[in-house]
Amino acid sequence: MITHSNSHTFSSLTPGVEYCFLVSTQLKNGMQSKSVVIPAQTDPIPPEKIHISQVTSDSVSLSWDTPAGEVVGFSVSCSCDGMTVQEMTTHSNSHTFSCLTPGVEYCFLVSTQLKNGILSKSVMTSAYTTPVPPEKIQVSQVTSDSVSLSWDTPAGDVWGYSMSCSYGGKIFLETTTQSNSHTFSYLTPGVEYVFLVSTQLKNRILSKSAVISAHTKPIPPEKIHISQVTSDSMSLSWDTPAGDVWGYSMSCSYGGKTFQEMTTQSNSHTFSSLTPGVEYCFHVSTQLKNGIQSKSVVTSAHTNPNPPEKMQVSRVSTDSVSLIWDTPSSEWWGYSVSCSCDGEAVQEMTTHSNNHTFSSLTPGVEYCFCVSTQLENGVMSKSLMTSAHTKPIPPENVQVSQVTSDSVFLSWLTPAGVVGGYSVRCSCDGKIVQDMTTHSNNHTFSSLTPGVEYCFLVSTQLKNGILSKSVVTSAHTNHLKLHELGDLLLELEAVKLNGYLPGLSYFDTARGVGPIVEKLLFYLREKWMSVGSKYKDEFRMLDLGWVIIGEVCYQRTCKPDEVRLQYQLRKGSQVT
């Protein structure tokens, strides 16, 4: 082309091609000078659609489209903070920069390059290498409602950490921290949580997540208590705690050694086959399906000791009861003994002996006695019970107050204590003649044989039939023939005293009295001889036979003063 200007632009050229330009001066008549030759290459087109195809913690991969024109290769460079880190030429339309520092922003320049080394304008892009995830993440502490995590700071630039807590596939908590530890709180007891921790850059780029899971601890059982205790078993129960619960782990120990160990899905359990009178320690923990257990709730208790064996009443008196028993076949420290009457405690005490006497009791009363084995801490066995009546007190001042030929009248004073009645018996020659019970404090035995000596036994009797010791007395029923003899002798004596029949003085002699005395029974004859000799020696009286025999015949008490009085009255003597 011809131009009148001293400059010209050739357009529509092919990029990256070497052109040769010839320029000649031209006259009006068309004549031209020699041509001046100027070679030149068009600039190559920069790479197109450059983009980052992959980023890792230590590499960045770039790719781009090949531009139009002649292209020999591409010049690629990587710089950080204005300093070139890597530079090279590639014939491919992609390149990966490796050995980079994690978490750092890099600037990448890509230029199209010709054979002669001419470069196109650079296309620039930047990218951060991915930060390294936290290292050695671990669960440092777990409670029933919190989980504490810790980790090592990774290599490379780190601004902070992004964390999340999920449960059942749903995110429960999300947070960010610049520390290399964190505690998730307000969690549900006994639940498995999944924790994700990522390294985070300032621009919020995150590393891959480090994943760890942990169960919060279950809550220990609540309000554990001992619901029942026997001599060989212990029953425990407790409330179900909050949170997930699969079951409970339980153990029973004695003297520091585990005696029983088991798992249950119930909130109660009975430990059996235990030793009586022993203190056991019980541990109960809430357990999850994976075997994780809560802290143990601990309680302790003594099994009941065995009760005393073969308790019996060994002795009973009017105011005391003695008990005796065998030592039980278990640990024991002593015995708790109590005495009650009509439901009210009368005496209560502790003894280390296997016998005890309750004294100062009321006669004729039924008492209930309880004996329990006792441990040093006061735990007691079941009570062994027995009852017994104190013996009633015998009747007091039993006396024969009236005697006839066929009856004897007895009377007595009411004794102290409880009295239900009296057992009265009459015997003769060792055989019971009459036996009966009365509620009165006197009794008349009738229909007896005249002139016979009877033995009378009177006992206080309780309502249940228990008798006191018998009070014994004896008496002779009067003899009818003796009465008649006595009457005859007294009449003869009265006639003799009048003085009209002096011949009756014959009976004052031994010969006259002898046949009369022989008519007496043997025991009366002996009595007459004893009493007569006594009065003869004491009063110097030789004619007392009538008085003595008359009194003897009537079974009266022959007191010296009474006989002397009778004699003086009959003689008309002055009474002294």
Image: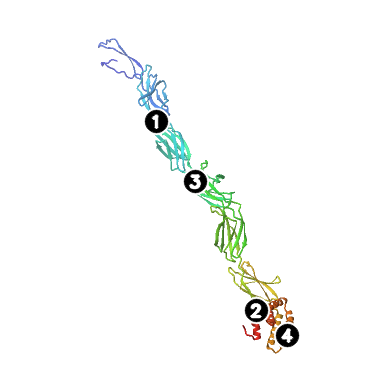
The 10 Å Cα crowd at callout 4, few under 14, some 14 to 19, many 20 or more, is few
2 or 4: tag closer to the N-terminus: 4
The answer to whether any part of residue 114 appears in the image is yes
Residues at marks 1 and 2 touching, judged by CB atoms closer than 8 Å: no
Distance CA(mark 3)–CA(mark 4): 122 Å
Q: Residue tagged by mark 2?
A: 560
Return the residue at label 3: 220
Q: On screen, 287 above or below 209? A: below
Q: Is residue 41 above or below residue 107?
A: above
C-alpha gap between disc 4 and disc 1 = 165 Å
Mark 2, other Cα within 10 Å: few <14 / some 14–19 / many ≥20: few
Left or right: where does residue 51 sit relative to residue 367?
left
* Amino acid at dot 1: Asp
Gap between marks 1 and 3, in whole Å? 44 Å
- Residue drawn at point x = 59 percent, y = 51 percent: 330
Question: Disc 3 vs disc 4: Cβ atoms closer than 8 Å?
Answer: no
Front: mark 1 or 2: 2
Q: Nearer the viewer, mark 4 or mark 1?
A: 4
Residue assigned mark 1: 157
Apparent side of residue 380 relative to residue 59 in the rendered image (left or right)? right
Here the colouring is rainbow
The kind of residue on which mark 3 rests is Pro
| Residue 427: % across, % down | 69, 72
Q: Name the amino acid type tagged 4.
A: Tyr
Q: Which mark is residue 506?
A: 4
Tell me which numbered mark, 1 or 3, is placed earlier along the sequence.
1
Q: Earlier in the sequence, mark 4 or mark 1?
A: 1
Q: Is residue 177 above or below residue 266?
A: above
Where residue 288 sits in the image (x, y, percent)? 51, 43
Looking at the rendered structure, the kind of residue marked 2 is: Pro
